[in-house]
């Protein structure tokens, strides 16, 4: 009813009240009664008018406020992508948003005042789902608190959607049921994304942990954030020990500046880099590492550095062995080409010198003897060249290393006395027989001990013992002049010698003998402190 029509109605009713009550008072005989009724009529009119005004003004405002709030609530819940539904204490639908109606295919239906079972009659596909919701609601009422659980609903296309459903029961002051708020959020895509992220994370974690190279993650300050198991295996440091430390502290001093300037700064400019460096392992040993580093990007910004390190120590050692083998091969070819050519004329020259020595004056014999000694030295060199050019076919037999070493001591006794060097042999425990070529080992020991005697030594100590891993360890230690580190790397190269009259062939032959016996030889030396040579010979050669 419009305000204008309501005003007309009010005027008509007022006029009817005034004239109608006045007409009825004409039938009252008592004047006092009539006066009382006149006042009562006025009072009733005032009360009626006041009530009408209250209803029209105050209640109307309250009604409009409630209506406006209801509209706002409806707008709010309809703007939500979540399923939102309000029920009364008896399970009847009070309000539901458009997303919920659309999902259950109930658009356009009058849902207010109906239960889930009643609404289920309007949809065949979701009939059972709506009926089962009533039981879920009952569980929420019984719990008496906010409940949260996952619900799985099938779509007509066969797809299953997962809903994170929250149910909030509200009670009256007397404990009776007032209303139930239900909010359901479709989290299917979220769960799929989480699953994909989890799968991707596991894949990258597996790649990180099982990578055959050591992998390390650095922050922008070059400090280690994470490392894989191979890092621990190669460096000897556990993750707990090294996380938080600067990666440059791992490399040797000579490579720290290179790593800091060439690698890290290069990568922080957005470029990858590959360099070879040396690291100090936990046990103090040094390893060659090929490092590849590249920036770790996040939203287009560099947030850190990822590095891969491959231990190339064995590869470099193999390359060095191949280079040494190539040099040996070249030396062998050279030796084969010249040894015989030298030996034949030397034999003739030696014969003529001996004839001249017997025929000439005694004063000339001294010079003849010097020439003969030098010719004999040349012959020794030629013999070494031939041994290098044509290694002997070894016939292995069982022999005792300590017996071979004792015979070597006898051969070198005069030379050690000449140089004033004290030699000592110590056998630690019982030694088994080994597979070897005794003459070759004798040549090996002579070369090694002779070098120690000629190194300005006062003492040469030789120790021999049996190892637990199937080897005999022979150590030859002197207190002589020592060897520079850069020279140790070249020991065994053909024709490399620091001696004034050395040919460099003795150690070359020694290395070949050790290699032929499938053993190992290692040098450790400090200048002016002495040299230690360690030889490992296997007990059995398969």
Image: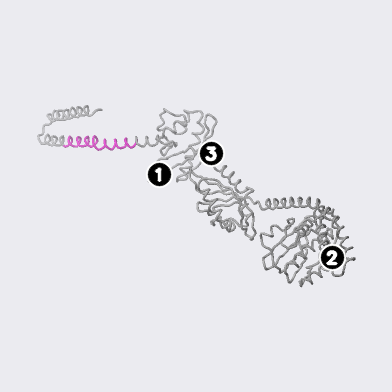
Residue pictured at 34% horizontal, 34% vertical: 71
Dominant secondary structure (helix, strand or loop) of the stretch shown in magenta: helix
Circle 2 crowding by C-alpha within 10 Å: few under 14, some 14–19, many from 20: some
Circle 3 crowding by C-alpha within 10 Å: few under 14, some 14–19, many from 20: few
Question: Mark 3 or mark 2, which is nearer to you?
Answer: 2
Residue pictured at 52% horizontal, 31% vertical: 155
Magenta region: which residues?
43-70
What residue did someone put label 1 on? 171
Q: Based on the picture, tell me whether residue 62 belongs to the magenta stretch.
A: yes
Q: Find residue 537 and report its image quarter.
A: bottom right
First reached walking from the N terminus: tag 1 or tag 3 = 1
Quadrant where the image shows the N terminus: top left
What residue did someone put label 2 on? 368
**Residue 185 x %, y %:** 47, 38
Residue 166 lies, with reference to residue 449, above or below; the image says: above
Residue 346 lies, with reference to residue 190, above or below; the image says: below
Question: Mark 1 or mark 2, which is nearer to you?
Answer: 2
Q: Nearer the viewer, residue 323 or 232?
A: 323
The answer for how far apart the CA atoms under marks 3 and 2 are is 99 Å
The answer for how far apart the CA atoms under marks 1 and 2 are is 130 Å
Q: Is the C-beta separation of discs 1 and 3 under 8 Å?
A: no
Question: Mark 1 or mark 3, which is nearer to you?
Answer: 3
Q: Nearer the viewer, residue 63 or 490?
A: 490
Residue that lies at the very extreme toward the left in this rendered image: 31
Q: Nearer the viewer, residue 235 or 199?
A: 235
**Residue 464 x %, y %:** 78, 66
Residue pictured at 53% horizontal, 56% vertical: 244
Q: Is the C-beta separation of discs 1 and 2 under 8 Å?
A: no
Q: Of helix, strand and loop, which one carries label 1?
A: strand
First reached walking from the N terminus: tag 1 or tag 2 = 1
The answer for how far apart the CA atoms under marks 1 and 3 are is 37 Å
Give the label on residue 192, or none. Answer: 3
């Amino acid at each position: 009813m419009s305000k204008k029509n309501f005003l007309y109605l009010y005027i008509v009713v007022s006029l009817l009240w005034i004239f109608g009550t006045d007409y009825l008072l004409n039938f009252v005989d008592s004047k006092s009664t009539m006066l009382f009724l006149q006042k009562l009529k006025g009072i009733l009119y005032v009360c009626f008018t006041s009530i009408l005004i209250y209803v029209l003004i105050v209640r109307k405002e309250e009604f409009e406020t409630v209506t406006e709030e209801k509209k706002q609530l409806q707008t709010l819940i309809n703007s939500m992508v979540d399923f939102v539904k309000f029920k009364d204490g008896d399970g009847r639908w009070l309000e539901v948003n458009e997303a919920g109606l659309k999902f259950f295919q109930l658009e356009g239906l009058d849902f207010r005042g109906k239960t889930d079972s009643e609404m289920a009659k309007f949809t065949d596909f979701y009939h059972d789902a709506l009926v089962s919701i009533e039981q879920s609601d009952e569980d929420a009422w019984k719990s008496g608190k906010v409940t949260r659980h996952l619900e799985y609903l099938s779509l007509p296309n066969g797809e299953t959607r997962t809903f994170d459903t929250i149910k909030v029961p509200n009670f009256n002051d007397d404990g009776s049921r007032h209303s139930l708020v239900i909010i359901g959020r479709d989290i299917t895509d979220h769960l799929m994304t989480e699953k994909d992220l989890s799968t991707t994370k596991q894949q990258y974690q597996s790649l990180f942990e099982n990578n055959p190279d050591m992998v390390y993650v650095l922050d922008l300050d070059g400090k280690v954030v994470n490392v894989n198991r191979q890092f621990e295996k190669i460096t000897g440091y556990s993750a707990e020990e090294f996380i938080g430390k600067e990666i440059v502290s791992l490399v040797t001093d000579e490579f720290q500046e290179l790593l800091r300037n060439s690698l890290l700064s290069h990568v922080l400019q957005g470029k990858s880099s590959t360099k070879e460096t040396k690291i100090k392992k936990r046990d103090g040993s040094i390893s060659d590492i090929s490092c590849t580093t590249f920036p770790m990007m996040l939203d287009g910004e560099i947030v850190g550095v990822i590095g891969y390190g491959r231990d190339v120590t064995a590869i470099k050692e193999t390359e060095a062995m191949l280079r040494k083998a190539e040099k040996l091969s070249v030396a062998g070819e050279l030796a084969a080409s010249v040894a015989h050519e030298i030996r034949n004329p030397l034999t003739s020259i030696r014969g003529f010198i001996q004839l001249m020595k017997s025929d000439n004056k005694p004063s000339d014999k001294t010079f003849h003897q010097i020439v003969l000694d030098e010719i004999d030295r040349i012959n020794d060199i030629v013999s070494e060249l031939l041994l290098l050019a044509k290694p002997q076919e070894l016939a292995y037999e069982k022999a005792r290393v300590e017996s071979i070493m004792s015979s070597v001591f006898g051969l070198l006794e005069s030379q050690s006395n000449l140089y004033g060097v004290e030699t000592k042999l110590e056998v630690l425990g019982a030694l088994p027989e080994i597979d070897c070529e005794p003459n070759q080992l004798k040549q090996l020991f002579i070369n090694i001990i002779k070098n120690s005697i000629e190194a300005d030594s006062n003492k040469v100590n030789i120790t021999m013992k049996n190892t637990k891993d199937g080897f005999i360890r022979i150590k030859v230690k002197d207190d002589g002049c020592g060897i520079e580190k850069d020279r140790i790397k070249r020991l065994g190269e053909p024709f490399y010698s620091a001696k004034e009259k050395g040919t460099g062939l003795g150690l070359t032959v020694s290395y070949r003998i050790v290699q032929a016996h499938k053993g190992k030889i290692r040098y450790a030396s400090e200048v002016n402190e002495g040299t230690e040579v360690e030889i490992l010979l296997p007990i059995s050669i398969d």
